[in-house]
Image: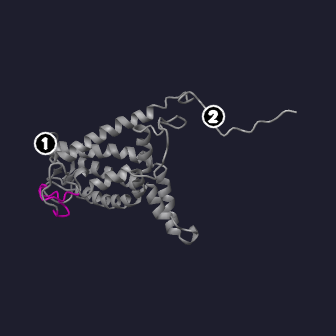
Amino acid sequence: MSTVEAPTKKRAQISAKTLRTDNWRSYPIFIVVVFTAWVGYATFRAMMGDHYWVDEYHYLTPFYSPCVSTECVEGSAHFGTFLPELPFFIPLAAVSLPFLLLFRLTCYYYRKAYYRGYWASPSACAVREPHRKYTGERRFPLVGQNLHRYFWAAAFLISLINTYDAILAFHGETGGFGMGLGSLILLANVILLWGYTLSCHSCRHIVGGRLKNFSKHPVRYWAWGVVSKLNERHGQFALITLGSLVVADLYVWLVAADVISDLRFID
């Protein structure tokens, strides 16, 4: 009689790092290059403390909105100056920037991106990671990722402020309505920011979560459907808004520094 051995409980051992044959390294390399460049630029501009406001056309770069310090240039403080003069290492937009950075840092898409790009946890699907153990997001500091929904609420309020800034950017040099290339750039940026904010997984849960019967809540069901459609493009909005923020800030910087003149359509 032949005997049947009991199945082993050990996992299959594969000596290769992965059996994938595609260029799986391209995504994590792309993320590291783009994120590092963006953080470097954003940090430099946030600490620069100059060339963020164009008084003639009411252009305010999103990196300095809202500007609430007493050292903000005249006209740029749309909501008052309730903070004193700040040390050089604290940006003028000290009220908004921490929440916006934490919102993106805890974002589901950004987690996947920097986990793969910087931590190789793992670098790609079906690729062995170098870490010996995995504890998930149950311990400090990664347990803080669960605060994402609260940072979303702050980002929502800041998006309203950015919208107000974009509306003010339709200002003529002599007063009244005006429109220039900067107006359109700031408007396009805020539309994309709304796309990123509203496509967030937390927004989808807030709009349609905790409902046992959609038919009894037709308005929320409709809103949930719209947000769900946007949610399919959340990762795209996350990357595109990095570019739109830089374009908006760079344009305001160059116009404020008199390097270029704003292209005016209506004055």
| Quadrant, the N terminus | top right
The amino acid sitting under disc 1 is Asp
Q: Is residue 47 above or below residue 33?
A: below
Q: What separation in Å lies between label 2 and label 1 (alpha carbons)?
A: 64 Å
Instruction: Please name the predominant secondary structure of the magenta segment in the image.
Output: loop
> Disc 1 on helix, strand or loop?
loop
- Disc number at residue 12? 2
The amino acid sitting under disc 2 is Ala
Residue named by callout 1: 258
Crowding around mark 1 (Cα neighbors within 10 Å: few <14, some 14 to 19, many 20+) is few
Left or right: residue 110 versus residue 187 is right
Q: Is residue 117 visible?
A: yes
Specify the segment rendered in magenta: 66-82
Query: Does the magenta-highlighted stretch encompass residue 74?
Result: yes
- State the residue at coordinates (21%, 44%): 45
> Disc 2 on helix, strand or loop?
loop
Q: Nearer the viewer, residue 256 or 104?
A: 104
- State the residue at coordinates (63%, 34%): 12
